[in-house]
Image (cartoon, rainbow, N blue to C red):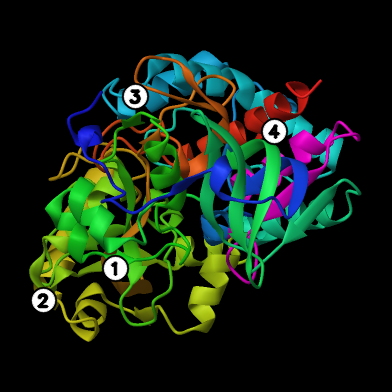
């Protein structure tokens, strides 16, 4: 167990009550705590047995969580959509990329299993539930060796969530309630028997199986301080309000093991002036970042998660994202988030790098020299001054740019689970009747920010969600 995982996040607050201390108000078969991507997918998977009653409780007014704030792009290897696009890839390739990115610090068995199940996840969503997904084959995120992102319409997580919610609401044996936080677990001899939830007033809900899908703890500043590196404490929080570590604390009190609690996903390009996300597709299509001195400060293609900390270490904790009209026109109409950022006035443009940089508060002359050096290396196909090769393309007038800062999106550490997403104790035994996925479970990004590979969040959210729902339902037979 990690040294970090030995800390107890509950700090004496009781997250679990004994079955002897409550009286049941209502009952269900499978109780899903959380209505984000993990919970919605888990509910659909569990509901495929029509005799199983599924209840989803979401504490926010609307479903979605971090999935709705993401691009909704789901990585998968060996899918029919890839083959139709002429892309041949195996789960081994996908697992290698993930593990190389985190220096093999993640659980290799879990990584490989999720990658093996990734094609099944995509086919199940598309074929069984008629969810709209298409293969993204016009750019790759940092350190992806192949086109493997499967995206919803508009490359927007809100659209993915909307379709999942519609499927959940139209499934007869699923009940979905919002403004309904799960407050405590109810247990008997270490096994979960139900929950206490706020349904206008507290109600005790008896359940045969409970799936924790409450995401991570990035919205809990105290837990971030306890577990994550100091640099991220001052980062703008850009995740869902409900990510306060509830499920992590619930599982821990029942003896659930924690791992990689210092892992998180940051983002390097949240626009300072409008608060809009500037998609990293801008960077991977050839955009660069400079600081107020007009200088590069690292290889942007290393990944947007770790580069968030690089941005925060610059003067004023800000940087300037520079790109050109080619990139602007390529992305417009492809990413709804990019289109919305344009509408909100996120980007400025000018005919020269110097004029644009000056407008955004950077040294214009130095920025112009920096872009000239970058262009020379990109045109020659050689590493530039920061060692970048991936995604490098010469920039031409007119130029576009935005002032950006580093942000914290979500945490990647949490409860250790098995191949069925059952919560495990340190001795390898399972916590009876309890499952976890998404940010509540330990992810596949190893430690810190640098191990995060784009798509890791939805791999564990939707991947574990489906596996938990299947097992929870089938184990009732």
Placement of the N terminus among the 4 image quadrants = top left
Secondary structure under the numbered disc 3 in the rendered image: loop
How much space separates mark 1 and mark 2, taking CA atoms? 25 Å
Measure how far apart labels 2 and 3 are at the Cα level: 41 Å
Query: Is 210 or 334 nearer to us in this picture?
Result: 210
Q: Which residue is mark 1?
A: 236
Mark number, residue 209: none
| Disc 3: which residue | 106
Q: In terms of sequence position, does the residue under pointer 1 or pointer 3 come before the other? A: 3
Structural distance between the alpha carbons of marks 4 and 2: 54 Å
Q: Position of residue 426 (x, y in %)?
A: 34, 20
Residue position for label 4:
469
Residue 363 numbered mark, or none? 2
Q: CA distance from mark 4 to mark 1?
A: 34 Å
Q: Earlier in the sequence, mark 1 or mark 2?
A: 1
Up the image or down, 142 lies above or below 63; here it is above
In this image, 220 relative to 190: left or right? left
Provide the residue span drawn in magenta: 37-64
The residue at 30%/77% (across/down) is: 272
Residue displayed at 32% across by 29% down:
101
Mark 2–mark 3 CB contact (< 8 Å)? no
The answer for how far apart the CA atoms under marks 1 and 3 are is 26 Å
In this picture, residue 151 sits left or right of residue 223: right
**Mark nearer the N terminus (4 vs 2):** 2
């Amino acid at each position: 167990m990690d040294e970090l995982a030995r800390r107890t996040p509950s700090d004496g607050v009781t997250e679990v009550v004994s079955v002897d201390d409550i009286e049941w108000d209502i009952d269900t078969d499978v109780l899903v705590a959380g209505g984000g991507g993990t919970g919605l997918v888990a509910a659909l998977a569990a509901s495929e047995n029509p005799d199983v009653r599924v209840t989803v409780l979401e504490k926010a007014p609307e479903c979605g969580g971090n999935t709705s704030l993401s691009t909704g792009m789901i990585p998968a290897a060996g899918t029919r959509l890839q083959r139709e696009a002429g892309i041949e890839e195996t789960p081994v390739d996908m697992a290698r990329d993930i593990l190389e990115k985190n220096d093999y610090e993640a659980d290799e068995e879990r990584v490989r299993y999720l990658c093996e199940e990734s094609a099944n996840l995509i086919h199940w969503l598309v074929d069984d539930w008629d969810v709209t997904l298409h293969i993204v084959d016009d750019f790759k995120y940092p350190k992806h060796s192949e086109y493997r992102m499967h995206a919803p319409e508009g490359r927007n997580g809100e659209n993915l969530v909307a379709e999942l919610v519609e499927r959940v609401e139209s499934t007869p044996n699923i009940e979905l309630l919002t403004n309904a936080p799960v407050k405590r677990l109810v247990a008997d001899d270490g096994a979960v028997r139900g929950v206490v939830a706020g349904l206008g007033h507290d109600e005790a809900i008896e359940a045969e199986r409970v799936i924790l899908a409450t995401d991570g703890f990035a919205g809990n500043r105290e837990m971030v301080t306890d577990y994550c590196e100091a640099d991220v404490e001052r980062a703008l929080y850009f995740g869902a309000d409900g990510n306060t570590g509830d499920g992590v604390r619930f599982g821990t009190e029942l003896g659930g093991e924690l791992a990689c609690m210092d892992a998180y996903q940051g983002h390097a390009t949240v626009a300072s002036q409008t608060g809009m996300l500037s998609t990293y597709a801008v960077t991977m299509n050839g955009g660069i970042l400079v600081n107020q001195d007009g200088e590069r400060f690292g290889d942007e293609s290393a990944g947007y998660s770790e580069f968030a900390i690089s941005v925060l270490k610059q003067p004023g904790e800000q940087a300037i994202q520079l790109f050109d009209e080619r990139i602007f026109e390529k992305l417009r109409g492809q990413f709804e988030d990019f289109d919305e950022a344009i509408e909100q006035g996120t980007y400025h443009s000018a005919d020269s790098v110097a004029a644009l940089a000056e407008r955004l508060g950077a040294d214009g002359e130095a920025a112009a020299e920096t872009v000239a050096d970058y262009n020379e290396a990109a045109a020659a196909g050689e590493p530039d001054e920061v060692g970048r090769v991936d995604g490098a393309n010469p920039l031409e007038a007119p130029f576009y740019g935005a002032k950006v800062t580093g942000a914290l999106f979500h945490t990647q550490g949490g409860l250790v689970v098995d191949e069925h997403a059952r919560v495990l104790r340190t001795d390898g035994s399972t916590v009876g009747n309890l499952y976890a996925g998404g940010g509540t479970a330990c992810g596949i990004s190893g430690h810190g920010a640098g191990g995060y590979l784009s798509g890791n969040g939805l791999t564990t959210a939707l991947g574990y969600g489906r596996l938990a729902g299947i097992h929870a339902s089938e184990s009732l037979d």
